[in-house]
Image: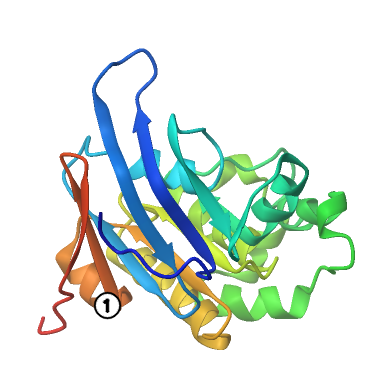
Amino acid sequence: MQSERPATSRLQAQGLGCRLPGQRQWLFRQLQLAIEPGDRIALVGPNGSGKTVLLHALALLIGCEEGQLLWRGCRIERARVPGFRAQVIYLHQTPVLFAGTVEENLRQPFQLGIHRGKHFDRDRLQRWFDQSGRSRRLWEQPGAELSGGERQVVALLRAIQLDPAILLLDEPTAALDSATTRAIETLVLGWQAARPDQRAYLWVSHSADQVARIANRALHLEQGVLREVPVSHGR
């Protein structure tokens, strides 16, 4: 029962218990977790320990058999789920892009009612494209023609342009080359640092070097137990 913080945390899991569908064994149980503004959390642990399931639960993409989630100290009622998902965005290791060009993919979220009042900022996105080392000619390419690294960059930009409070990153650089990995890290770190009193992320990683670069906290999940571990910055 680890990493517990006050109930006023931005996002808090209280006593979460989850099993894989159709299985009796618990992946984790009585799990406590709090994410605060300013947190840059690395989630580590062996394959199969439940890291992805935990992220899915935190994003309300699945339900858990036990426990509850609190958002800013309150339970998340069904009517508030769309607003919650606009603030807590999950990014898959292999993101899916919609049919159409990169620009159409980036504009698509603004068609949703939950993002009414937000606007598409091409200049800001172009600056992020430059930071990621991607050519602006990518704007007109069909999403289906992009490499894995390009899809990951576009999916990340599609998310952070919406100014969420929390990103849940499920091994976003696991299959990418070192240059694209560093570009993704730079974009996420820059997004969080722009408003450190409002933004946080939880990043699943298997690389100790990456954890040292991107995290100010590290949580280890194994055999159902989540515990805080030191972050080594000596590498």
Q: Quadrant of the N terminus?
A: bottom left
Residue at the image point whose x is 37% and y is 60% from the top: 203
Left or right of residue 196, residue 77 in this image? right
Residue toward you, 99 or 114: 114
Is residue 92 visible in the rendered image? The answer is no
In the shown orientation, is residue 174 left or right of residue 231?
A: right
* Residue 219 x %, y %: 25, 61
Quarter in which the C terminus is drawn: bottom left
* Colouring: rainbow
Please give the name of the residue rendered at 77% of the width and 53% of the height, measured from the top-left corner. 109
Circle 1 sits on which residue?
213
In the rendered image, which quarter is residue 65 located in?
top left
Query: Considering depth in this image, is 76 or 215 the residue closer to the camera?
Result: 76
Q: Amino acid at mark 1?
A: Arg
Q: Residue at the location (58% across, 70% down)?
A: 135
Residue 25 against residue 45 in the figure, above or below: above
Local SS, label 1? helix
Residue at the far top in the pictured view = 22
Residue 1 vs 50, above or below: the answer is below
Mark count: 1
Say above or below: 204 vs 60. below
Identify the residue at image location x=82%, y=57%.
110
Task: Determine crowd level at label 1: few under 14, some 14-19, many 20+ residues with C-alpha closer than 10 A.
Answer: some
Determine which quarter of the picture holds residue 35.
Answer: bottom left
